[in-house]
Amino acid sequence: MNLQSVKTIYLAEMARSLRTVLQSIVSPVVSTSLYFVVFGAAIGSRISEVDGVSYGAFIVPGLIMLMLLTQSVSTASFGIFFPRFSGSIYEILSAPISYLEIVLGFVGAAATKSLILGLIVLGTARLFVPFTIQYPLVMLLFLVLTALTFSLLGFIIGIWADGFEKLQLVPLLVVTPLTFLGGTFYSIDMLPPFWQTVTLLNPVVYLVSGFRWSFYGSGDVSIWASVLMIVAFLGVSLAVVNWIFKTGYRLKP
Amino acid sequence: MTISFNHLPTTMPDDSTPEDRAAPGQSETTGSPMIQVEQLDKVFDGGFQALKNVSLEIQRGEIFALLGPNGAGKTTLISVICGLVRASSGSVKVDGHDNVADYRQARAMIGLVPQELTNEAFTTVWDTVSFSRGLFGKPKNPAHIENVLRALTLWEKRNNRLLELSGGMKRRVLIAKALAHEPKVLFLDEPTAGVDVELRREMWEVVRQLRDQGVTIILTTHYIEEAEEMADRIGVILRGELVLVEEKAALMRQLGRKELTLHLDHALDQVPAALAGHDLALTEEGHALVYTYDVARQEEGTGIAGLLADLEATGIRVKDLHTRQSSLEEIFVSLVRERA
């Protein structure tokens, strides 16, 4: 393992996030805070408890998950897309490093940034609504696995995209809608039975549910179903990345 | 420009480039070559064959220039050697290491300066050059980075972001990045494209200094003057085929044409019959006779002495004369036309 190379890519990506601190960190924190103000304080005050917790507290795990998914995908996709776009990817592809090391550097940095953001948003949420975390280790595990998995998805998108439009396509048209419809702002028990069944096809439901379980000890689906889903998602993402490097898809003609 | 690459390898160059070649690309020098390319083919997905059975050996410490028109396969060949493009068949060894099976060892020796100005615009010169060193697995060495930046007159710009630099400066940054990990082989793909004459000459000096310190240099260029000025050996690639590899001096001897222009005292209407046996042309409205001959023929002692004797016999008086040897560019153009 060429740790020096992994560290170099990782630190360069982290430095990029720091160079764009307003866009990378301040912007998601501000937008998540707005969600808390609008949904938690303004609308939430008119909604009774959901699953035994106040509405403001109920949406905390979902909002963190929403930010985690979108940030992981956008950071990782931009991280690998930009060197492709500028042409400086030549240097990475001609360096004495393995594919695994390239992925570790880029995905590791994107996941780290998302994790830090997740924890910042968690702290910000605490300023707006009181809540407790029943299973902090499970919460951390979900944060790490989700950040990692969706950073891998972002990495895949960054290689697949051949322009800035495609780069935004999946985060805006797939990830965000699935998260909004994945029980971020409501319990799926609140839906009619037919739509409850349809919602179970949305993988994000399992992530939000599992994450919420770590806070309040209850979720829309079993915690084991949530764990299974995130592990399966991780496995599929790893398999796709492996295929990309084996075939040289969009990297090596 | 004072150049000192103290941290670069100190292997002395091998000057024993071959006079005679067995086949294009095959060297007869003893000892293992630095780069060994064998029967390389590259067919892209669309069916375009960019490389056809290319075999080439590049010796340690030499400057090898790869010439060819646009789309001939120069960049593809470099890209395959550097691991950026996968070969369809054939093999590449760098210092004896297969560039697929032992890619870490092979790539660690190579520095690549790409044709395009590909830089991350928002990083500083220092950061991007240090990044290149780390990417190749080398521990930090600020003294080496400083040395490289100073040699390329980038030291004063070390804290500037790349978007603030001129095109020539960006080109130097790419060279600095390629040298950051102390490579033994340096590929320069059109290194002086778009840079002014002064900077071009400075870069040539840098390349020579590197060669003197044992770095093997492979460059592609459109500026034939560049190859003529710097290269020890020259390869010509046409439509994916390596059609010729030769020591530069030998190539110019073998393929070069020389012209002897004789300025006459009195103009002639036509070439006199007594001189018909010589390859002469009348120019400058009859005031000059131009005699064209192969360099090789001249070395064999034919042509000029006989011509001068015949001129004397016909009573034609010559007031001045000069000779001109065809440039590498003319040789290259002639080669391309021959094989078109």
Image (spheres, helix red, strand yellow):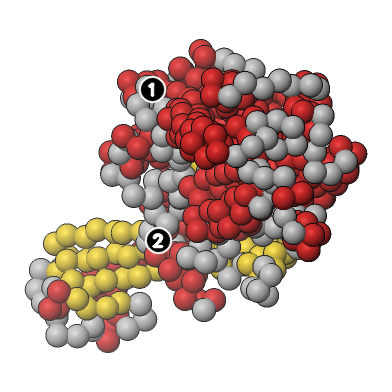
At x 80%, y 38%, the residue is A219
Position of residue B159 in the picture relative to residue A38 (left or right): left
Residue to which mark 2 is pinned: B329
Going by the image, does B281 lie left or right of B69?
Answer: left
Q: Is residue B6 above or below residue B65?
A: above
Q: Which residue is mark 1?
A: B158
Residue B197 placement, left or right of B46: left
Q: What residue lies at 45% left-to-right and 23% top-to-bottom? A: B126
Q: Nearer the viewer, residue B49 or A37?
A: A37
Mark drawn on residue B257:
none
Quarter of the image that includes the N terminus of chain A: top right
Of the 4 image quadrants, the one containing the C terminus of chain A is bottom right
Rendering coords of residue A242 (x, y %): 80, 49
Q: Earlier in the sequence, mark 2 or mark 1?
A: 1
Where is residue B296 drawn, in percent x and y?
49, 62
Front in this rendered view, residue B269 or B144: B144
Dot 2: within a 10 Å radius of its alpha carbon, few (fewer than 14), some, or many (20 or more) residues?
some
Chain of the residue that carries numbered disc 1 in the rendered image: B
Which corner quadrant of the image does residue B47 belong to? Answer: bottom right
Q: Amino acid at mark 1?
A: Arg
